[in-house]
Image: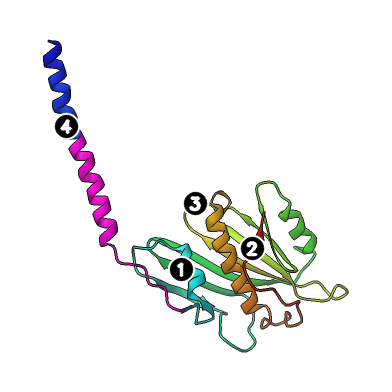
Amino acid sequence: MTNKTGFMRKAIAVPLSLAVACVAGVAVWKFTQDPLVHVPDRVCRASLPGDSVEPLFPRRGEEFREEYGYGFSTAGATRAPGLCELTAAGESLRLRYSLLLRPEVRGWDDVLRDVRKPGNVPVSLGPARGFAEGHSVTLYVRCTAPRAKEILLAVQVGVSGNPLTEDRPRLTKAGALTADIARNVTPRVVHCGSAPRLPPGPPSTG
């Protein structure tokens, strides 16, 4: 009876192992057959470098698409808000900026409070401050002199998939893209032309 039972277990185990191997083989085959994702050299109406966007998408899958965009341009003054939505390989990015004109509703002190909020990851780029929260990272730029009415420019990158606060390598990539957007739009957004110049490179996190 023992030998018979052992034989039956082996007989069942062999097909199961073959099934697992077949499933794994199909997954590997599908991955290698999916086309490489190609991100253009410039995205969001040619205003941003594609190599800042590409690391946030999987290497293979559905083709890159610029779904929607306004407020992003290559030259000249622009008005907030701005929005650009990108998709590829089943993932999506939502890039946007807006002006905060009412400090009594949300001002610099509110930003600094949220930077210190438990669970958020502080982000800074020169004089700009911000934080990562859930699936987005936001940088705030002060657009006016201290004695003038406070105007803030908020620049945000939102991602699909896992929260950025749980994936530091991806947060670093999203932060670099946020910095690129901030450097691009800050000098040209109405009310922000006199804002301090933002330094090159990615923001610091943590």
Q: Give the distance between the C-alpha atoms of the residues marked 3 and 2, in whole angstroms.
A: 17 Å
Residue located 39% across and 71% down the image: 64
What's the residue type where badge 2 is placed?
Answer: Thr
Residue located 56% across and 57% down the image: 171
Q: Give the distance between the C-alpha atoms of the residues marked 1 and 3, in whole angstroms.
A: 17 Å
- Please state which of the two labelled residues, at mark 3 or mark 4, is closer to the viewer: 4
Disc 1, SS: helix
Disc 2, SS: strand
* Residue 188, picture quadrant: bottom right
Q: Residue furthest bottom?
A: 76
Sequence-first tag of 2 and 1: 1
* Residue 156, picture quadrant: bottom right
Disc 3, SS: loop
Q: Residues within 10 Å of mark 4 (few under 14, many from 20)?
A: few
Please tell me the numbered disc located at residue 162. 3
Residue 12 as seen in the image, left or right of residue 176: left
- Please state which of the two labelled residues, at mark 1 or mark 3, is closer to the viewer: 1
Q: Give the distance between the C-alpha atoms of the residues marked 3 and 4, in whole angstroms.
A: 36 Å
- Residue bearing the label numbered 1: 54
Q: Residues within 10 Å of mark 3 (few under 14, many from 20)?
A: few
Residue located 42% across and 77% down the image: 40
Please tell me the numbered disc located at residue 138. 2
Quarter of the picture holding the N terminus = top left
What's the residue type where badge 1 is placed?
Answer: Glu
What's the residue type where badge 3 is placed?
Answer: Asn
What's the residue type where badge 4 is placed?
Answer: Val
Sequence-first tag of 3 and 4: 4
- Residue bearing the label numbered 4: 14
